[in-house]
Amino acid sequence: MPYLPLLLFLAIYGFASLAWNLPSLVGLAYLAVSLGCFLAYAIDKSAARSKSWRTPEAWLLLLGLVGGWPGGLLAQQWLRHKTSKVSFQWKFHVSVAVNIGIFVYLSRQLAVPVID
């Protein structure tokens, strides 16, 4: 069930796109930040293996909070990074919930009326 938040978000995004005429730029922004977040996790995983300077967890969480969490979630699963650290996981899941909440709120506030 690690992909459940991503599936839920895709459903919410699809609804917002159809019901509220969400601009496609929002999806592109999520994609760009997610790619950056995935790369940050990959760099941190590499640094952990080589015992060099690590990316602070606060940065990984902040990237997730501003919309990169889908990339962070995929990086956690595909790279097996930060999945067993409970203190990070609960903060990550809170940041995902906060981001989705803000997304829904702003999507509704910025809804473009559809004129027939």
Image: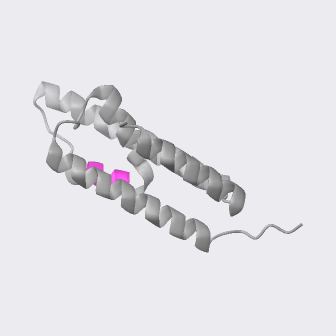
Classify residue 27 as left or right of residue 59: right
Measuring 16% from the left and 45% from the top, which residue is drawn there? Answer: 86
Classify residue 110 as left or right of residue 76: right
Quarter-of-image position of residue 54:
top left
Image height check: is 68 above or below 84? below
Quarter-of-image position of residue 100:
bottom left
Classify residue 29 as left or right of residue 47: right
- Residue 57 lies in the magenta stretch: no
Q: Position of residue 40 (x, y in %)?
A: 32, 40
Measuring 34% from the left and 27% from the top, which residue is drawn there? Answer: 78
Q: Position of residue 10 (x, y in %)?
A: 55, 46
Whether residue 98 is visible here, answered yes or no, is yes
- Residue 63 lies in the magenta stretch: yes
The quadrant the C terminus occupies is: bottom right
The stretch in magenta equals: 59-64
Check the image and name the residue furthest to the front.
1
The quadrant the N terminus occupies is: top left
Whether residue 65 is visible here, answered yes or no, is no
Measuring 30% from the left and 57% from the top, which residue is drawn there? Answer: 94
Check the image and name the residue furthest to the right.
116
Classify residue 96 as left or right of residue 113: left
Towards the viewer: 29 or 9: 9
Q: Position of residue 46 (x, y in %)?
A: 22, 28
